Amino acid sequence: MYGGGYIFEENGSGEIEDSVKLKEFETRISAGDKVEPTDWMPVEYRKQLIRMIEQHAHSEIIGALPEGTWITRAPGFRRKLALMAKVQDEVGHAQLLYSAAETLGKPREMMINDLINGKSKYSNVFNYPAETWADTAIIAWLIDAGAIINQVANSKGSYGPYCRALERICQEESFHLKYGHDNVVFLATGTRTQREMVQGALNRWWKPIMHFFGPSDKISVHTETMMKWKLKMASNDEMRQKFLDMYVPKIRDLGLTIPDPALRKNEQTCKWEYTEPDWEEFKRVINGDGPCNKERLAVRKKAEEKGAWVRRALLRNSEQYVVPLS
Ligand code: FAQ
């Protein structure tokens, strides 16, 4: 059904959507109702949701890779255990999110194929390498912080299955953030070499983190539609501002320097001013031309190929236990 593009042309029940239904739907959304999978929804709402949840799911499995490469090299047994648990959590988030996206009619296999073939996007940040142990600390602290800001807001959104998945994910991400903060504090208050290492990681990650919240509101394509339907509860710039409000003081308290000489809070507008991120570079990275895009997709492709026999065995096994209905 999905493969023929069916749900993108008509709604789930095969009817062409009409303005009365659309009005009722939008009234429900304004009243704060949750939309559930079997409810009527506009074709464009479904399409935008699939795009967003699928990209989010891909970001979680690809996001496990930069930190995952440090499991074998973590400094000490306790750090290794904690990192392994974090990486496992991220993959678990992908499972929840793929399930939420499946409720909208797109099969998981198709989503994975679209990822591997470069048709679907995933977060820009995971196309950069984690060069040192300090990079994993910055990822776990600041990328998780950015993800929490986005996801706590969007968990109050309109689509039930996505909101419920986000609530659970945010609880785990909060623990990741504490783990990341602990690692950064340890390095930032350590030896000179450790302090330089964490400053170096911050220098490398600041630009991708500023990109993380999406293009500026002036050039964002989907924000207006997404906010109208409460798929997104704040604009990209609003999320970026919130991140800066919460984390610039914390980063500076640790004696770290944020690598943007223009960064300052305008006390009159209460807004952060910063060097405008390079949106051309952002576009290149999200469209396949970042430092690690090819490597990330190659790893994912290999995992998919190597896991094929497990999926086949599970399917065959589950067929044996199907109880006839009559
Ligand atoms: N990276 O019109 P907008 C995590 C694309 S989870 C790549 O502003 P929208 C956990 C966008 O898709 C991180 N592409 O788009 C973790 C669109 O392209 P399209 C992921 C991006 O949807 C932590 C085009 O640019 N979180 O980190 C990005 O209104 C640590 C135009 O942009 C989510 O996915 C980007 N950063 O707003 C795991 C949350 N930004 O599709 C491991 C859900 C934009 O037309 C370790 N998603 N694009 O080809 C959202 O909230 C939104 O989709 C935004 C983008 C805010 C990401």
Image (cartoon, rainbow, N blue to C red):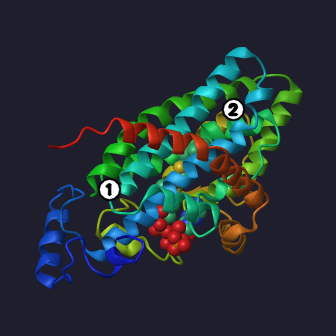
The image quadrant of residue 49 is bottom left
- How far apart marks 1 and 2 lie (CA) works out to 44 Å
Considering depth in this image, is 169 or 317 the residue closer to the camera?
Answer: 317
| Image side of residue 168 versus residue 91, left or right | left
The image quadrant of residue 249 is top right
Is 130 drawn above or below residue 31 in the view shown? Answer: above
Q: Secondary structure at mark 1?
A: loop
Report the disc number at residue 95.
Answer: none
Q: Look at 30% across and 76% down and name the residue there.
A: 43
The image quadrant of residue 227 is bottom left
Residue 170 locus on image (x, y percent): 43, 39
Ligand 1 within 8 angstroms of badge 1 C-beta = no
Q: Secondary structure at mark 2?
A: loop
Q: Is residue 247 visible?
A: no
Ligand 1 within 8 angstroms of badge 2 C-beta = no
Q: Look at 27% across and 58% down and name the residue there.
A: 158
Which image quarter holds the C terminus? Answer: top left
Is 228 drawn above or below residue 248 in the view shown? Answer: below
| Image side of residue 2 versus residue 177, left or right | left
Q: Which residue is mark 1?
A: 103
Residue 322 locus on image (x, y percent): 30, 39
Residue 261 locus on image (x, y percent): 74, 57
Q: Which residue is mark 2?
A: 254
Amino acid bearing label 2: Leu
Q: Look at 51% across and 47% down and name the residue there.
A: 147
Considering depth in this image, is 8 or 139 the residue closer to the camera?
Answer: 8
Amino acid bearing label 1: Thr
